[in-house]
Each structure stands twice: as structure tokens, then as C-alpha cells.
Amino acid sequence: SFQSSCFLKNKNRTMTSEAVKANFVKYTGFVAEDKSDKKTLKWATTKLNSTKKDGYTITCNQRPIEKCVLIETEVIFESKKVEDVVAVFGDSISYENDETLTEYKVVEKKGNSVVHYGRYKIPIPFVSDRDLVFEVTKEVITEGTFVSTCDVERSEHPVDKKVVRMTLWGGALFTQDGDNVKLVTYDYG
């Protein structure tokens, strides 16, 4: 089940180093998949295919996974240092500026890890709000900087029966590529 996607998570605890390592193994499994396999894995391109934006180029692919969609995103940030790009990835400022969030807060900061809580109001009649408690952990590894994102359980944010608790798994690897930063992410939830 999806709940097992974040290995070794426990109530009121941040992800362990073993959990981040397990998420990196899962990430490398996605990297190794044959993206040309349209029949078995059903990888498909999206509208964002080598799309140039101001200061970066983005490409996204997707495939079904469990009852979700796995998104592969590659971004090339032009003339950037990996440390600068990683510094803002998963930072609270990006969530604080999300207009779809009706509630947001940092639950805990500890070392290289931050636990976030967010609640989304769904503007459709008779559709429940959604919320998510998730942790973003950054680790410098041999391959670059790996950022693991995963839903977690926290007693200060118990499941509310009137709100749908979302799940999330994500892995992102940042590498310096000459003057540019290459980011490859896999996310689903």
C-alpha cells in the first residue's frame, strides 16, 4: 500500500537516515526504468517537453502507479549553483505563498529536516477539504544532493474525519552540471 512508501516512519519522529536511504533506492529504481516502454510501464510525455522558461528548461513525463500518477520532472536551472537551488527547495516560503492553502505551518525543524502541515480548501460543493503532514529531508550524497519528501504522522495534527488526509512520496536529486544545476524528481501522492 502507499503507506509503506516512506520506509521506517513512526508517529512523531522524523525520517531516519535509513528511511532516506530507502527512499533513494526507490528513486534510483524509477531512474532506471525504461522510459520508452509505453506498454508495460505506460510512460507518457506531457505538454512540458523541453519547455524553456525564464532561467530554466523543464521536461515532465508520467505513468500510472498504484492509484496515482508518478511524475518525472527534469529541470535545468541556467547559471546556478546547486547549493542555491537546494536552499529554496522545500523551504517554507514556497508553501506560504501557495494561494490554495487555507492553513500552513512548519511543525518542526531538526537538522536537515523540516516537517510541514498544510490544509487545502476544495472549492467544490460537497467535497471535503484536504490536508497533508509531510517531511522534507535534504542529504548530501556522492551523486549530489538528495531531497526526500514523504507524508508523516504527527500527534499534533491527527486525522480529522471531516478532512481527507493526503499521502505523498517524492525524491529529488540535484547535481551541478557545469554552470547549470540539473534537478530530476519523481513524485506521487
Image (cartoon, rainbow, N blue to C red):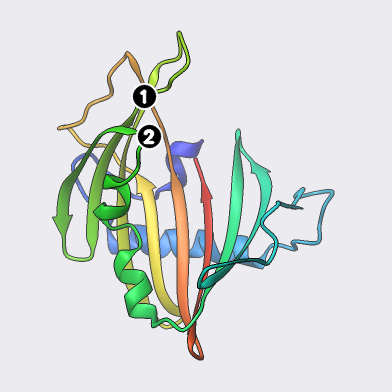
Instruction: Give the residue pinned by disc 2.
Output: 100
Q: Picture coordinates of residue 53 (x, y %)?
A: 57, 65
Of 140 and 73, nearer the camera is: 73
The numbered mark, 1 or 2, whose residue comes first in the sequence reads 2
Instruction: Give the residue pinned by disc 1.
Output: 121
Of 5 and 100, nearer the camera is: 100
Helix, strand or loop under label 1: loop
Of 103 and 141, nearer the camera is: 103
In the image: residue 52, left or right of residue 39? left
Q: Quadrant of residue 75?
A: bottom right
Which residue is pictured at 61% across the width and 60% down the height? 30
Say which amino acid is labelled 1. Answer: Lys
Check contact, mark 1 vs mark 2: CB within 8 A. yes
Q: Picture coordinates of residue 164 (x, y %)?
A: 39, 22
> Label 1 crowding class (10 Å Cα cut-off): few <14, some 14-19, many 20+?
some
Q: Picture coordinates of residue 175 (x, y %)?
A: 47, 79
In the image: residue 151, left or right of residue 174? left
Say which amino acid is labelled 2. Answer: Thr
Q: Picture coordinates of residue 160 (x, y %)?
A: 27, 19
> Label 2 crowding class (10 Å Cα cut-off): few <14, some 14-19, many 20+?
some
